[in-house]
Amino acid sequence: MSAGACGHVLFFTSAAAFRAEKLCCSAGIAGARLVPVPRDLSSDCGVALRFSLEPGKARASVAAVEALLTEASVPFERTVAE
Amino acid sequence: MKLGGDRIVYLDNAATSWPKPAAVGEAMAEFLRDSGGNPGRSGHRLSIAAGRIVSCARDAVASALGMSDPLRIAFASNATAALNTALYGFLGPGDRVVADGMAHNAVARPLTELGRRGVQVDWARTDRAGRLDLDHLESLARSLPSSGATKGRPPARMIIVTHGSNVSGALVPLSEAAGIAHRLGAVLLVDAAQTAGLEDIGLGTLGCAAVVAFTGHKAMLGPPGTGGLAFGPGVEVDSFAPFVRGGTGSSSGSEDQPAFMPDRFEAGTVNGPGLAGLLAGLRWMEERGRSAVRRAELQAIGRLVDGIRAIPGATVHGPGSREPRCAVMSFTLAGWSVSDLALELDERYGVLCRVGLHCAPRAHRSLGTFPEGTARLAPGPFTTTDDVDYTLGAIGELAVERKYGP
């Protein structure tokens, strides 16, 4: 169970989610792991990528993940920060 | 290789590669034992573990095909299913398509049916060695006045080439075929059943709208039941309708097939254990170096071609040993039917090959070997020089014996 605030990336397809997980883990994104899509979010795909938000720098944490995925042409539906 | 005490020389790698690296079977068993969830369907640890393996297999295939975006690969049960997806998904009444004269029935049969449905199909000629006449192909595809039958018809919407012939081993230069497709604005569909995993395809840099159908159980060294369709960067995926529709684990609230890749073409549960095996096969190939394995196989096929050419009464049907080719060759032997030849090679010498028409009657008509067919030899990564020389010795002995005729 991760402690602290976290963000999620939602995807259209699980194929993109698995690719995103590999990229984020390789890039050292803190807390990156696949989880079932949280109940309060909805997505076309059953898994989401969870990652840790750096205290006080939530926006930068999300932007870093978005930039990584965009750079690698991994399509995602949206990002959500707690 | 010894099997049950008798020597076995397996030269049927064009049908399916054998043996597989030990890691292939181990990876499949491990998948079923340790990560047997349904990839991409659930969020629990076994489903995610399975999904990671499928994702790694997708990455490995992309690398083997020379493309950068693995999400443009849709897995299928084999190259035949992939080719059917591409052909039925793209072509409709009034469309023109040009295919090459070495086509396998995986291309020829769908095109025959599509012809009944109003698709105009033209066949580019090859010579008696199976080399594709690229000028003829371009002329047909352009509908030049000089191309007779195609005069006044629209340019071809799709060009289909057999990258490596499963009969003669002739290799089509993909960069030249891609150039033709690019000049005409046509989609290039490559049947890479014999070559994907071993030959350089460079799908990401072909410079035209290209789609590659591949199988996992031949040069990629994976198990049967794996393969797929890879869409190059220049091709509009939306222009291909899905051939099979169904559950994808995504967009579950909609009864329409998702438009996005790879779910657009991956309805139903994917072959997880098979893809685990395919990943292991591709990793084995990467560890040894694809170009080193290809060099060794070409050395083996070259030795077979030259050696059989030197046997009195033997005829090689295909390109020479130093011409562009893959590790497949066909021959016939005077005084022998190909079926008797295969039986004798198997029972007396343990040399295993495939004879007949190899599901490619059009290719045999091009080579002039229809309807009798040929004996086909296809070495693989485990074939040794001693295996090749032993096989040449066996064929040499049979050539002297002659079962029929003078």
Image (cartoon, coloured by chain):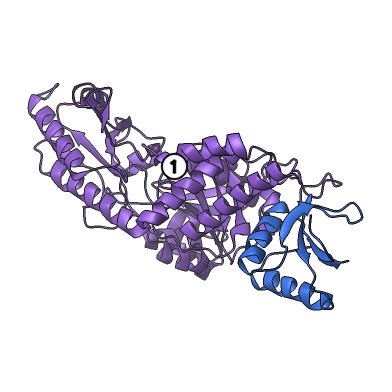
Chain colours: A blue, B purple
Q: Nearer the viewer, residue B186 or B402?
A: B402
Identify which residue is drawn at 33% across, 36% down.
B12
Residue neighbourhood size for the residue with mark 1, other residues' Cα within 10 Å, grouped as few (<14), some (14–19), many (≥20): some
Q: Looking at this rendering, what residue extends furthest in the right direction?
A: A40
Residue corresponding to mark 1: B23
Q: Looking at the picture, how far across and down is residue B372, in whole percent?
A: 29, 30
The quarter of the displayed image where residue B134 is located: bottom left
Query: Quarter holding the N terminus of chain B?
Result: top left
Q: Nearer the viewer, residue B213 or B404?
A: B213
Q: Looking at the picture, how far across and down is residue B369, in whole percent?
A: 28, 37
B24 to B298, vertically: above or below: above
Q: Nearer the viewer, residue B186 or A7?
A: A7
* Residue B215 in sight in this render: no
Q: Is residue B219 left or right of residue B236?
A: left
A3 to B384, vertically: above or below: below
Q: Looking at the picture, how far across and down is residue A54, in whole percent?
A: 79, 73
Q: Looking at this rendering, what residue extends furthest in the front direction?
A: A3
Identify which residue is drawn at 71% across, 45% down.
B45
* Residue B69 in sight in this render: yes
Identify which residue is drawn at 84% across, 78% down.
A56
Chain letter for the residue marked with disc 1 in the picture: B
Q: Nearer the viewer, residue B334 or B98?
A: B334
Name the kind of residue labelled 1 in the image: Ala
The quarter of the displayed image where residue B21 is located: top left
Q: Looking at the picture, how far across and down is residue B395, in whole percent?
A: 15, 33
Q: Secondary structure at mark 1?
A: helix
Query: Quarter holding the C terminus of chain B?
Result: top left
